[in-house]
Amino acid sequence: MSSHKPQLTKLLKGEQASVLQPYALTAQQRHFETASSVARSRLTDYGNALQAELGRMLRDVEFSLDVNLCSSVGLEQWLAEPGVLLLDSTLPLETDLLCYMSIDFQAVHNMSDLFLGGRLSEEQVLVEKAELSSSELRISCRLLQKQMQVLMQSLFNQHLPLSAFVYKQQLQFEPYAYMPFKVRFILDNTVVSWFIWLPVELFLADSISSPVQDTALVPGPVLTEWEQVPVRAQIEMARKQVRVQQLENWLQGEVLPLELFTQMPFRLGKQSLFYGVVAEEGNQLMFQVSTIAENK
């Protein structure tokens, strides 16, 4: 009778694992990655179409333009600083989606010079002031309006009437709900830039009449062997010191009130990989990653 030794799964070396692409754990993160991939594939066409549209509005201005998807790290702090104008626009889809534009006052002054006079003012000194002129606000709204019209034309091949307004509240984006794009308006010696914030649903929609609200995940590559290695994880939701007397009281039917951590650690062994919160998906409670631990 022959004995068969169990086959052992080989683990990757540290330097090999460091170059692998992380796999998004939550549906929200995976939706964000899918939308980001779609957005990147269309950036060149969108940038060219936007440059052509602005060129029709600024006939006497020689410029180039590029649009890039960027990280939101640090941008939310910038949004809260004085001297930054925030505007919003509602896209008239089956379910209204809001998009935003953030632009600092100096960029507003520069774009107003170009729209009204065709060239920048000679003095490029940032003047601090509490309010912008009505012309500057109107031009800023027009700039967001044109960007969104070009985007809708690019995504859905339809030219829709849109409106844009000044957004007077402090804006806080939900994680993985919006993607920031940096638009760079490049002149000979000056670069004027601003950001537009687009909802991820916009890049997960199959048609303009029925944007996807709960998009099925795009099938990814076949899992490699290392992704199938089982690991034992621990999520710590609460911690409480108790006395022996309390243990005896529980046996008599008493209950112990608990307060859940606002940031719950997800650990493999002694290492915290993520922090998350309790979320609800369907009718079940889930653990949703909110931040990645900074392991040193």
Image (cartoon, helix red, strand yellow):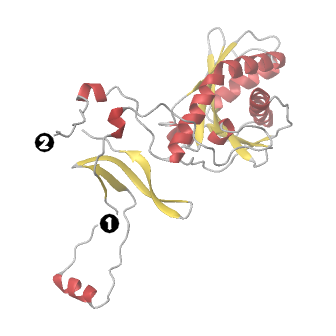
Q: Position of residue 58 (x, y in %)?
A: 80, 16
> Image height check: is 122 above or below 274?
above
Direction from residue 236 to residue 179 in the image, left or right: right
Q: From the image, which quarter does the N terminus lie in?
A: top left
Direction from residue 235 to residue 93 in the image, left or right: right
The residue sitting at the front extreme is 1
The front one of 289 and 34 is 34
Label 2: which secondary element: loop
Q: Position of residue 200 (x, y in %)?
A: 62, 40
Label 1 Cα neighbours within 10 Å, binned few <14 / some 14-19 / many ≥20:
few
Label 2 Cα neighbours within 10 Å, binned few <14 / some 14-19 / many ≥20:
few
Residue 120 in view in this figure: yes
> Image height check: is 142 above or below 185?
below
Q: Residue at x 66, y 38 (%)?
A: 204
Q: Residue 32 falls in which quadrant of the image?
A: top right
Q: Residue at x 37, y 51 (%)?
A: 275
Q: Earlier in the sequence, mark 1 or mark 2?
A: 2
Structural distance between the alpha carbons of marks 1 and 2? 52 Å
Tell me the residue that label 2 is attached to. Answer: 1
Q: Residue at x 70, y 11 (%)?
A: 63
Is label 1 or label 2 in front? 2
The front one of 294 and 228 is 228
Q: Amino acid at mark 1?
A: Ala
Q: Position of residue 227 (x, y in %)?
A: 36, 37
> Image height check: is 273 above or below 55?
below
Q: Residue at x 46, y 58 (%)?
A: 286
The front one of 184 and 180 is 180
Q: Position of residue 279 (x, y in %)?
A: 49, 59
Q: Amino acid at mark 2?
A: Met
Tell me the residue that label 1 is attached to. Answer: 238
Whether tag 1 and tag 2 are in contact, CB under 8 A, the answer is no
Total number of numbered labels? 2
